[in-house]
Image: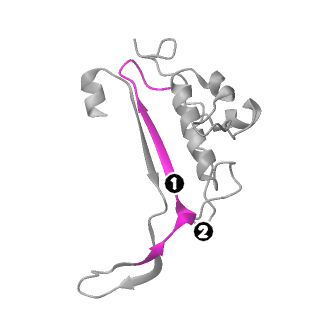
Amino acid sequence: MEYAARSGLPCAVMLISDGSLFSNGMTDTSAAGGGKGVWTADSSTTAAAVMLAFDPKGRPAMASNQIGSFNPDGSVNATGSIVASSVNLFTEAAVLNYMAMHGMQGQFQSVVWANGQAQGLGSPATYTPLIAFEQLPSIVNGKIP
């Protein structure tokens, strides 16, 4: 983001966690453990993604700031969004938001992936709630001038 600011160009960054590790709640009291939690296994139930945008011409406007949710126990609410438990639909939602940053979300309905399949998020009524970003201030006609 600092490089984008110095270059005067907008940028987007996406961080994705597959859930990483989780602790069983026990404390590792060994000398090497130092009182930290015992990391026991991988946890796909706590996966998350964050998408950030920077634009030197102004703060990116947001249609929403969160898609999906977590349950009280910290696990992903698999029914909270159509992308919550579907890697392929999550990927499509990321592309949709990138297109929205360029003001091109209206073209998403006609997206055809490299394997020849049409997008799987359905109609605009289904995928519009998945759009978090509005067009970035620096974008004109889908491009950075």
Helix, strand or loop under label 2: loop
Helix, strand or loop under label 1: strand
Q: Residue at x 50, y 49 (%)?
A: 49
Per the rendered image, the range of residues in magenta is 39-61
Query: Which residue lies under the disc numbered 1?
Result: 48
Q: Residue at x 73, y 30 (%)?
A: 124
Residue 120 among those drawn in magenta: no
User: In this picture, is 68 found above or below 132?
Assistant: below
Q: Is residue 117 left or right of residue 33?
A: right
Q: Residue at x 69, y 40 (%)?
A: 121
Q: Nearer the viewer, residue 69 or 140?
A: 140
Q: To which quarter of the image does residue 91 belong?
A: top right
Residue 60 place in picture, x, y as percent: 47, 26
Within-10-Å neighbours for mark 1: few <14, some 14–19, many 20+: some
Query: Where, quadrant-wise, is the C terminus in this rendering?
Result: top left
Q: Residue at x 44, y 37 (%)?
A: 52
